[in-house]
Image (spheres, helix red, strand yellow):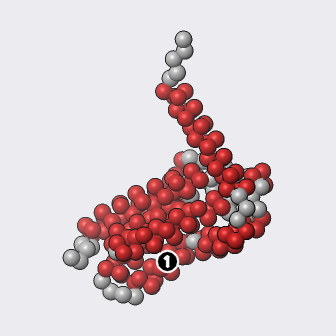
């Protein structure tokens, strides 16, 4: 009778999670979606360097009060999420980018393959940080922003530059970053009642 150690069980679970992640990645790559390909490629590109979120923040910042506060909070949250994902998590957990060729990701979906490691997705972290922060300040914007954030995260898998697990981890980092930034900002700049 063999007794499996916690470390052995943990390795087995991680192996199964990686296998599932790869299977989902390959299933997405194999799904013919010519109508979506161009749109998702453009969305993925629009979110490079958080340009999409900064543009939305710029529109929000024009209106004083809660809207301006939401814009500032969204941008601060992006900064926290970017640092957490790109400066900490990517260096601690090194994961090689997916092999688009082996998975047969259609060329029409391709965006530039980033040089950084794959885990976690910085795009997803920034997207969910912005959506959660701004949505918390202006609840009527929460659903639309989260829908766009989800589309951005999915676009990274669809274009072949991330595994699904990378984007889930990025989304979690983004939500946690928004909560942290909101907590600190509420101490420094209390929300108007």
Q: Is residue 75 above or below residue 62?
A: above
| Quarter of image, res 28 | bottom right
User: From what the image shows, is residue 93 above or below residue 5?
Assistant: below
In the rendered image, the residue lying farthest to the top is 1
Q: At numbered mark 1, what does the secondary structure look like: helix, strand or loop?
A: helix
Of 145 and 118, nearer the camera is 145
Q: Residue at x 46, y 83 (%)?
A: 58
Q: Is any part of residue 30 visible from this angle?
A: yes
Task: Estimate the x, y position of residue 17 in percent, counting from the top left.
Answer: 58, 41
Please give left or right for residue 49 compared with residue 137 in the image: right
| Left/right of residue 127 with respect to residue 24 in the rendered view | left
Q: Is residue 193 above or below residue 2?
A: below
Dot 1: few (<14), some (14–19), or many (≥20) neighbours within 10 Å? some
User: Depth check: 88 or 177 in front?
Assistant: 177
Numbered disc total: 1
Quadrant location of the N terminus in the rendered image: top right
Could you tell me which quadrant the C terminus lies in?
Answer: bottom left
- Judged from this view, the residue extending furthest toward the left is 193
* Residue 76 screen position, x and y as percent: 41, 70
Q: Is residue 38 above or below residue 176?
A: below
What residue is shown at x 70% (from left), y 71% (from top)?
35
Q: Percent x, y for residue 177?
A: 41, 60
Where residue 160 appears, as percent x and y from the top left, is 68, 59
Can residue 73 be spotted in the picture? Answer: no
Going 54% across and 47% down the picture, which residue do you hit?
92
Identity of the residue drawn at 44% across and 65% down: 129
The residue that label 1 is drawn on is 54
């Amino acid at each position: 009778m063999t007794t499996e150690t916690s470390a052995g069980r943990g390795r087995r679970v991680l192996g199964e999670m990686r296998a599932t992640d790869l299977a989902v990645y390959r299933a997405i790559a194999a799904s013919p979606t010519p109508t979506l390909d161009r749109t998702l490629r453009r969305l993925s590109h629009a979110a490079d360097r958080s340009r999409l979120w900064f543009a939305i923040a710029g529109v929000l910042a024009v209106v004083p009060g809660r809207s301006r506060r939401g814009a500032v909070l969204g941008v601060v949250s992006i900064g926290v999420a970017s640092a957490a994902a790109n400066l900490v998590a990517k260096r601690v957990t090194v994961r090689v980018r997916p092999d688009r060729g082996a998975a047969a990701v259609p060329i029409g979906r391709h965006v530039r393959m980033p040089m950084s490691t794959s885990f976690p997705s910085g795009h997803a972290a920034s997207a969910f940080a912005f959506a959660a922060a701004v949505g918390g300040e202006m609840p009527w914007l929460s659903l639309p922003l989260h829908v766009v954030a989800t589309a951005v995260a999915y676009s990274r898998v669809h274009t072949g530059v991330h595994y699904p697990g990378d984007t889930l981890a990025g989304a979690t980092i983004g939500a946690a970053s928004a909560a942290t930034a909101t907590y600190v900002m509420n101490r420094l700049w209390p929300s108007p009642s």
